[in-house]
Image (spheres, rainbow, N blue to C red):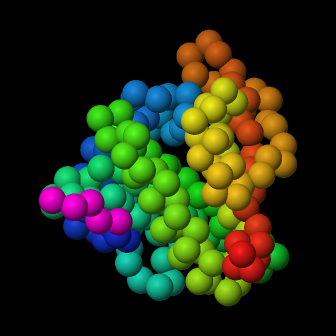
């Protein structure tokens, strides 16, 4: 069965929740939310995140194969007037068993294609934990550029980790 990349709707909430709780637990250094914080959220929080309306401020895509969710990525749109030209990529995750199949690249491509189709957007931003070379390479190939480093950004146990801030110029992608 072939893989499909699609915008997820509320019916995917249980699978999305399960996948992301696994991500938070397996890679605590990569996410700013803890598994305990997110596990405490009711299912309707996850369903709201997966709203399919055009006005939805958060949009999530999934790589699916039948009823299986193989990976996800989200885009958060800014609503404040002075920053409505920006969006934030969040929660790109593909479990180990599905890596090296091009899923992350496919999800990222789909998100950027969608973002380019929103005329108000000029910039997509994201953060990556310092030392995550695979993620940095993927984002770099997609056109993201480093613009700063936030020291002591995330506390994981006794460690304080830096986050690298990246941005992608959508107008540049639209012209290429």
Q: Which residues are magenta?
A: 1-5
- The image quarter in which residue 121 lies: bottom right
Residue under the image location 67 percent in, 87 percent down: 119
Whether residue 33 is visible here, answered yes or no, is: yes
- Compared with 18, 8 (above or below) is below
Q: Residue at x 71, y 36 (%)?
A: 163
Q: Quadrant of the N terminus?
A: bottom left
- Residue 152 highlighted magenta (yes or no): no
- Residue at image position (41%, 83%) is 53
User: Can you say which quadrant of the picture contains the C terminus?
Assistant: bottom right
| 81 left or right of 93 in image | right
Q: Is residue 14 visible?
A: no
Which residue is at a point 35% across and 70% down the rendered structure image? 6
Residue 8 in percent (x, y) is at 33, 68
Tell me: 132 left or right of 23: right
In the image, residue 57 lies at what x, y percent?
54, 73
């Amino acid at each position: 069965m072939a893989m499909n990349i699609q915008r997820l709707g509320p019916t995917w909430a249980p699978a999305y929740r399960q996948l992301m709780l696994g991500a938070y637990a397996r890679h605590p250094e990569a996410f700013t939310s803890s598994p305990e914080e997110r596990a405490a959220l009711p299912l309707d929080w996850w369903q709201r995140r997966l709203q399919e309306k055009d006005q939805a401020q958060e949009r999530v895509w999934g790589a699916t194969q039948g009823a299986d969710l193989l990976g996800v990525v989200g885009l958060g749109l800014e609503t404040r007037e002075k920053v409505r030209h920006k969006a934030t990529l969040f929660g790109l995750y593909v479990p180990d068993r599905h890596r090296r199949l091009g899923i992350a690249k496919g999800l990222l491509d789909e998100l950027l294609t969608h973002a380019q189709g929103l005329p108000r957007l000029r910039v997509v931003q994201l953060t990556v934990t310092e030392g995550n070379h695979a993620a940095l390479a993927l984002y770099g190939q997609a056109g993201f550029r480093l613009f700063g480093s936030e020291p002591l950004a995330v506390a994981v146990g006794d460690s304080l980790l830096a986050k690298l801030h990246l941005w992608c110029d959508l107008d540049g992608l639209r012209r290429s």
